[in-house]
Image: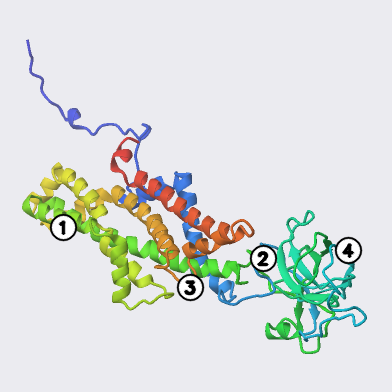
């Protein structure tokens, strides 16, 4: 049985303080502050972010620090691998010399000899340098001439003689001067006597290691010496930390300039067509019905257009001739033809999100389609958008490399990472650094954008935040 109790003044006293009780609270954070905190916890994404910042510094600030001209050719250091600074011997400018002839020996044999002796007395005159290697030998009796070969590896008999340098047609010629693209490495010179027409099966070989050298006029032109310097002195050659390419151009300077082209195409084009695809797909998914069908059928039509054909048409329309860089037509083709994939993905997300309760509440409060799409729907599709963008960047870089390979993209001498790779393929076996460095930069860029995209997706995903 319930009883009634009279309330007194004590029943209305404030409750005792509970300051000693443990309180669990979280500081108020904005959407992006919370995303940044979560991103910093992802080590791979954070390292990728630093790599992208480093690439931006390399691209924008690097040319101000490393001021070498990417088009300047250093003919004394062609296809040089990465190395420390090199020195060279200063030599006189080239002066044509008379062909060495032994006047006591007949120029032609008296008949057709059945056999000839091997060349003897094969030696080098003076100091062999990368400017000139002068050979001398004793004449062979009954010889009507000599064949001169040069190889970078030791020949085995008549096998592997290498590059034919000269076919001398007189038996009294007893010397030869080699000035053909010499480098500071070991060469093997082989001399074979002939009867004036055919070579005999005897060969004499001499091993020669030319010293790196530079002429006085070349050193003055490159400002490596003063006018008072004389031949015989040692000078410091231009430093190429990442080596040079097949034309003697500095690889580091070309990588910096190529980064501007590759990253411009790889970032600007995806940013524009992904942004367009986001709004196109957002409105198509939100409006639905006939409008959605018409917009998406047009997107299907764009997907069916052949990219390569339109690239050719754009080059013709812009008047880009053979050997000219088609950067602008490539950029326009990427923007006009690659947005439908993003539009489809965003449309699918919008169709799912537009039925959520908070969208209906915003609509009841007077929010129009533009407001709902820009403030509610698109921010909730940021994960899909960022993943699409991170895949679009490497895709654009690879597209540029492919078009450069078939001669429709960036044309020499303008460098890009893709065109540098295509040039490096030709010398891949003998000079792998020409392919390795541009391929390495492409790989690092692609990996960094992908890992950063994964980290951003996790940081911006509201469902993953709610589980923490």
Q: Residue furthest top?
A: 1
Q: What residue do we see at 61% from left, 57% from top? A: 432
User: Counting residues from the N terminus, which is met first, the one under dot 4 or under dot 1?
Assistant: 4
Q: Position of residue 28 (x, y in %)?
A: 32, 47
Residue 52 located left or right of residue 458:
right
* Residue displayed at 47% across by 56% down: 445
Q: Secondary structure at mark 1?
A: helix
Q: Secondary structure at mark 3?
A: loop
- Residue tagged by mark 4? 117
Of residue 161 and residue 241, the one placed in the foreground of this image is 161
Element type at mark 2: loop
Return the disc, 1 or 3, that comes first in the chain's sequence: 1
Q: Nearer the viewer, mark 4 or mark 3?
A: 4
List x then y, in percent, for residue 344: 22, 50
Q: Quadrant of residue 430?
A: bottom right
Along the polypeptide, which appears first: circle 2 or circle 3?
A: 2
Residue indicated by mark 2: 80
Disc 4, disc 2: CB below 8 Å? no
Q: Earlier in the sequence, mark 4 or mark 3?
A: 4
Front-lying residue, 32 or 14: 32
Closer to us: 241 or 109: 109
Q: CA distance from mark 4 to mark 3?
A: 54 Å
Residue where numbered disc 1 is placed: 298
- The image's mark for residue 414 is 3
Residue at x 43% of width, y 48% of height: 451
């Amino acid at each position: 049985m319930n009883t009634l109790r009279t309330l007194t003044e004590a029943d209305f006293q404030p409750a005792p303080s509970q300051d000693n009780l443990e309180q669990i609270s979280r500081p108020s954070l904005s959407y992006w502050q919370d995303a940044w905190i979560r991103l910093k916890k992802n080590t791979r994404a954070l390292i990728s972010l630093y790599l992208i910042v480093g690439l931006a510094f390399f691209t924008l600030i690097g040319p101000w620090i490393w001021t070498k001209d990417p088009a300047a050719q250093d003919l004394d250091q062609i296809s040089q691998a990465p190395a420390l600074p090199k020195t060279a011997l200063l030599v006189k400018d080239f002066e044509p010399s008379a062909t060495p002839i032994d006047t006591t020996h007949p120029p032609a044999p008296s008949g057709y000899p059945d056999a000839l002796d091997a060349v003897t007395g094969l030696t080098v005159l003076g100091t062999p340098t990368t400017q000139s290697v002068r050979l001398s030998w004793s004449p062979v009796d009954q010889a009507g001439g000599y064949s001169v070969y040069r190889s970078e590896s030791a020949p085995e008999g008549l096998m592997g003689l290498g590059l034919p340098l000269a076919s001398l047609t007189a038996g009294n010629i007893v010397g030869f001067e080699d000035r053909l693209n010499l480098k500071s490495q070991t060469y093997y010179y082989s001399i074979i006597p002939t009867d004036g027409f055919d070579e005999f099966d005897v060969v004499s070989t001499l091993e020669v290691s030319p010293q790196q050298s530079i002429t006085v006029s070349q050193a003055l032109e490159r400002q490596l010496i003063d006018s008072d310097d004389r031949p015989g002195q040692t000078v410091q050659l231009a430093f190429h930390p990442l080596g040079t390419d097949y034309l003697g151009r500095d690889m580091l300077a070309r990588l910096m300039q190529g980064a501007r082209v590759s990253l411009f195409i790889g970032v600007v084009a995806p940013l524009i067509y992904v942004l367009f695809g986001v709004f196109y797909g957002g409105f198509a998914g939100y409006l639905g019905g006939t409008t959605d069908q018409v917009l998406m059928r047009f997107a299907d039509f764009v997907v069916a257009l052949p990219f390569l054909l339109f690239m050719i048409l754009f080059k013709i329309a812009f008047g880009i001739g053979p050997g000219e860089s088609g950067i602008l037509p490539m950029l326009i083709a990427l923007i006009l033809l690659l947005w439908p994939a993003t539009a489809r993905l965003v449309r699918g997300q919008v169709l799912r999100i537009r039925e959520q309760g908070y969208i209906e509440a915003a609509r009841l409060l007077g929010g129009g389609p533009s407001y709902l799409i820009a403030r509610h729907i698109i921010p909730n599709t940021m994960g899909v958008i960022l993943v699409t963008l991170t895949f679009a960047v490497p895709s654009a870089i690879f597209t540029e490399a492919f078009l450069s390979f078939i001669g429709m993209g960036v044309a020499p001498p303008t460098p890009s990472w893709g065109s540098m790779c295509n040039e490096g393929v030709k010398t891949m076996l003998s000079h792998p650094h020409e392919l390795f460095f541009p391929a390495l930069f492409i790989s690092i860029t692609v990996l960094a954008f992908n890992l950063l995209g994964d980290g951003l997706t996790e940081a911006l995903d509201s469902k993953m935040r709610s589980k923490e």
